[in-house]
């Protein structure tokens, strides 16, 4: 890798774009970051604009997308708001909450967003320039597809960013969905000449089977576009942690490693995670799925809520709206019946708020006071100020715990026992028998706490045949995931070609692109 300073006044950079959402951009970025960091390169991740309700709190009290936190981890860095300066958190199909440099900046609709463009573009370019001054390499991740040409004029995350910073672009596609060669060709062809000039190569993700069968297609693709395929990354069912996109949490999907064969031959514990329409921080349940013998599945029906040994009600970006959805689907009644018969429930953040006696929300939904499910005798009050903080404390058994909070709603009146102890605030959350709730995200990632909880749940649900594994290490599982990503990148990506792009930038000319693609453009 060319050291910083030999490529100009700033470090080298590369943009990993996609032909669609969930194409594998985050995986490729994390893998590249880890591979470069393992070779001694000072590397940082960057996503100019992310749209996701899966987020984390940085050490300085800001909020960024979860994928950028994982990518920072791959680099050996603490998460920072520098890595994701613009985060959009959709609360509906039409409006999103804007987080700018880690802090709330207001809500916008699709049309309103036009007025934000110049401000956000300036922030994004400043942050990327700053990172390139401080690191040898910055690996940028695009957003969705780079070919959203109706949004090109205001783009700050894909080709707009690549043009502003003169970044070479690797275009990633998910071949598991089918049509990948057409996606790569069409995505390149639909771009304008100046944007095409930055597309430096292609990456096929999630390939299964014999690569020799794919090779003729790759050769034809190179003939049509003038671009090489720099990597064919095989499908791996071992990669499942920290999935950021909501597409990764479909109803009926079992979460967890495919190789799980149970805890020492004992029975299995069934966990139903309710797939809310506006779910946030869906990754909270992944720590449960790391445990041998624990089956975690996304559900949206009352029968699954009744049958499970444990139900998890996760966070949401729209507490009141998703509470109404629970009632419409019969899930609210199923949760109430479950609690009445002593069935274990764990509710997190927005899910915890739904279990209150009443919710007063003039902020997020504008609905004012609405009835909650009443499983806890407490009230939730929404305020304009947003709680963003990392937290430490003690679990019910005296174990050290840690987590983070991201919410507008706060507990008002409460007649409930608290569930955990917060070092800063004292008692936190609520517990009534087998029903537990907390505002803390990340709590289930604490190994000793999680083991104790699962043992209690097994007893409460009458599952004496389930034995908690004594040695599951969730942090180690996450490390193995990013190392596997790096191994896949090192083995199946042409790293020499990629590092050359990082060092020297894009090399294609518009005349070459025009030569290859002009015959396929539509005629007037």
Image (spheres, rainbow, N blue to C red):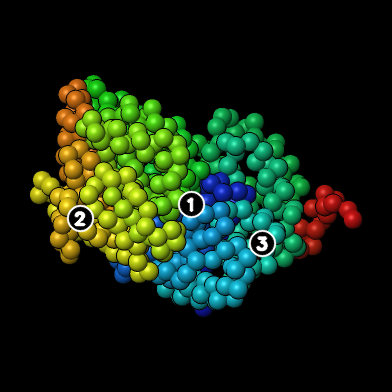
Q: Position of residue 196 (x, y in %)?
A: 71, 60
Q: Position of residue 12 (x, y in %)?
A: 52, 67
- Residue 62 position (above or below residue 32): below
Please identify the residue farthest to the left as the structure is shown.
398
Task: Pick the residue in front: 302 or 184.
Answer: 302
Mark 3 sits on what residue? 151
**Badge 1: how crowded within 10 Å, few (<14), some, or many (20+)?**
many
Residue corresponding to mark 2: 414
Residue at 67 percent of width and 55 percent of height: 147
Tell me how far mark 1 sits from mark 3, CA to CA. Answer: 21 Å
Nearest to viewer (mark 2 / mark 3): 2
| Residue in the picture at 77% in, 59% down | 512
Residue of label 1:
26
Task: Of the two numbered discs 1 and 2 on the same chain, state the one appearing first in sequence.
Answer: 1
Which quadrant of the figure contains the C terminus?
Answer: bottom right
Q: Residues within 10 Å of mark 2 (few under 14, many from 20)?
A: some
Percent across and percent down for residue 120 are: 54, 72
User: Can the viewer see residue 393 in this picture?
Assistant: no
Tell me, yes or no, if residue 204 can be seen here: yes
Vertical comparison of 277 with 16: above or below? above
Q: Secondary structure at mark 2?
A: strand
Location of residue 270 by image quarter? top left
Question: Which residue is found at the position 30% from the left and 42% from the top?
Answer: 287
């Amino acid at each position: 890798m060319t050291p910083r300073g030999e490529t100009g006044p700033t470090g080298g950079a590369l943009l990993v774009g996609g032909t669609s959402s969930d194409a594998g951009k985050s995986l490729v970025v994390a893998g590249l970051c880890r591979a470069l960091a393992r070779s001694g390169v000072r590397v940082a991740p960057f996503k100019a604009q992310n749209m996701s309700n899966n987020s984390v709190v940085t050490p300085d009290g800001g909020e960024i997308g979860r994928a950028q936190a994982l990518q920072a981890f791959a680099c050996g860095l603490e998460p920072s708001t520098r890595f994701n300066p613009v985060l959009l958190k959709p609360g509906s199909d039409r409006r999103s909450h804007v987080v700018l440099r880690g802090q709330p900046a207001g809500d916008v609709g699709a049309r309103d967003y036009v007025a934000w463009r110049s401000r956000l573009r300036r922030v994004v370019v400043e942050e990327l320039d700053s990172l390139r001054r401080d690191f040898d390499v910055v690996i940028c991740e695009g957003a969705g597809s780079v070919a959203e040409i109706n949004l090109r004029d205001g783009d700050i995350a894909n080709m707009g960013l690549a043009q502003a910073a003169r970044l070479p672009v690797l275009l990633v596609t998910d071949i598991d969905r089918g049509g990948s060669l057409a996606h790569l060709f069409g995505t390149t062809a639909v771009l304008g000449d100046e944007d095409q000039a930055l597309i430096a190569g292609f990456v096929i993700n999630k390939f299964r089977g014999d690569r020799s069968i794919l090779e003729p297609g790759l050769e034809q693709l190179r003939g049509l576009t003038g671009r090489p395929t720099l990597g064919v990354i095989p499908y791996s069912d071992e990669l499942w942690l920290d999935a950021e996109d909501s597409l990764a949490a479909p109803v009926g999907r079992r979460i967890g490693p495919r190789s799980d064969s149970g805890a020492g031959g004992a029975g299995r514990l069934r966990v139903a995670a309710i797939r809310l329409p506006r779910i946030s921080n869906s990754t909270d349940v992944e720590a449960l799925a790391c445990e041998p013998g624990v089956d975690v599945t996304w559900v949206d029906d009352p029968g699954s809520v009744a049958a499970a040994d444990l139900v998890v009600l996760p966070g949401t970006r729209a507490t009141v709206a998703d509470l109404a959805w629970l009632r419409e689907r019969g899930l609210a009644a199923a949760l109430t019946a479950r609690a009445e018969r002593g069935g274990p429930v764990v509710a997190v953040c927005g899910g915890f708020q739904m279990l209150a006696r009443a919710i007063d929300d003039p902020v997020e939904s504008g609905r004012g006071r609405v009835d909650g499910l009443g499983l806890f005798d407490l009230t939730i009050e929404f305020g304009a100020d947003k709680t963003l903080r990392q937290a430490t404390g003690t679990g019910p058994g005296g174990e050290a715990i840690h987590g983070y909070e991201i919410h507008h709603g706060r507990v008002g009146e409460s007649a409930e026992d608290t569930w955990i102890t917060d070092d800063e605030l004292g008692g936190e959350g609520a517990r009534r028998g087998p029903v537990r709730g907390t505002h803390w995200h990340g709590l289930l990632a604490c190994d000793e706490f999680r083991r104790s909880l699962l043992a209690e749940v097994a007893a409460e649900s009458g599952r004496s045949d389930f034995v908690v594994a004594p040695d599951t290490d969730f942090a180690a599982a996450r490390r193995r995931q990013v190392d596997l990503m790096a191994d896949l990148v090192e083995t199946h990506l042409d790293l020499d070609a990629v590092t050359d792009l990082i060092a020297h930038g894009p090399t294609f000319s518009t005349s070459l692109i025009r030569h290859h693609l002009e015959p396929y453009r539509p005629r007037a």
